[in-house]
Image: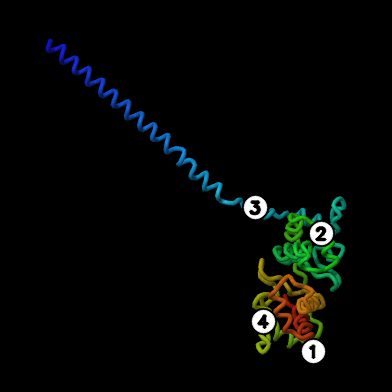
Amino acid sequence: MRQTSQISKLTSLTASFTAGLVLAITSVAVCAEEHAPAATAAPMAEAAAKPVVPGKPKADPAAGEALYSNGDASRGVTACLTCHGPKGQSAVSTWPKLSAQHAAYTAKQLKNFKEGTRANPIMMGMASTLTEQDMQNIAAYLVTQPVSQGVAQNKETIELGQSIYRGGIAAKGVPACAACHSPTGAGIPSQYPRVGGQWAEYNAAQLLAFREGTRKNSSQMTTIATKLSDQEMKAVADYMAGLH
């Protein structure tokens, strides 16, 4: 009887231990299920909260060259080469030289023409048919082309032009052009355009446009140009033509 009683007690203890173990395992599983959705939801919610920022189109210089040289009749895109010359080296001062110009600057100007923030009847029409991808492609092609050289023509204003470009005009609050466009006129990529070697007539016309308010896509240049006289504009524009 004593052995039977001991066996009974042992069986009862075993059953209790097993029941407790099952309950413990069940509790852990339930706890895991309750916390798993929250843990999974957290990174998902965080990812959803971050806005998707579209990247800039990847530039294709080869496509840019094709569009620059041949245009695209199916979309009404005229070849840039017609006015700006092969490889962006125009033959006359009416049209600016575009070779080796910083890609970000070229793309911005095309965008400004299309938006109308830079006024020019011809270029506004040309840019109207271009997509942002076209602009990036053309700019990527032009920046790889050889720098076009030029020479200063007016010996009488060389010293004045050099003085303005290198040192500015302190009495008028005009900063040195070299501070932004570099001592050689090469500019600073993504910030300030290349001006060295550009047609003197073109640069003078742009300074005048900034001063008169007909070109409004650079508040900095507008402020500077309003302080320059016609003679000072022509002198510094001629000096820049010979920079390289």
Q: CA distance from mark 4 to mark 3?
A: 38 Å
* Nearer mark to the viewer, of 4 and 2: 2
Q: In whole angstroms, how far apart are the C-alphas of marks 3 and 2? A: 22 Å
Give the numbered dot on residue 128.
2
Q: Please tell me which residue lies in front, 4 or 231.
A: 4
When the figure is inspected, residue 172 is found, relative to residue 37, above or below; the finding is below
How far across and how far down the image is residue 220, in percent? 68, 75
- Measuring 73% from the left and 70% from the top, which residue is drawn there? 217
Whichever of callouts 4 and 3 sits on the residue coming sooner in the sequence is 3
Q: Which residue is denoted by mark 4 in the rendering? A: 176
Give the Cα distance between marks 1 and 4: 20 Å
Callout 1–callout 2 Cβ contact below 8 Å: no
Q: Amino acid at mark 2?
A: Ser
Q: CA distance from mark 3 to mark 1?
A: 52 Å
Q: Quick check: 30 left or right of 238?
A: left
Label 1 Cα neighbours within 10 Å, binned few <14 / some 14-19 / many ≥20: few
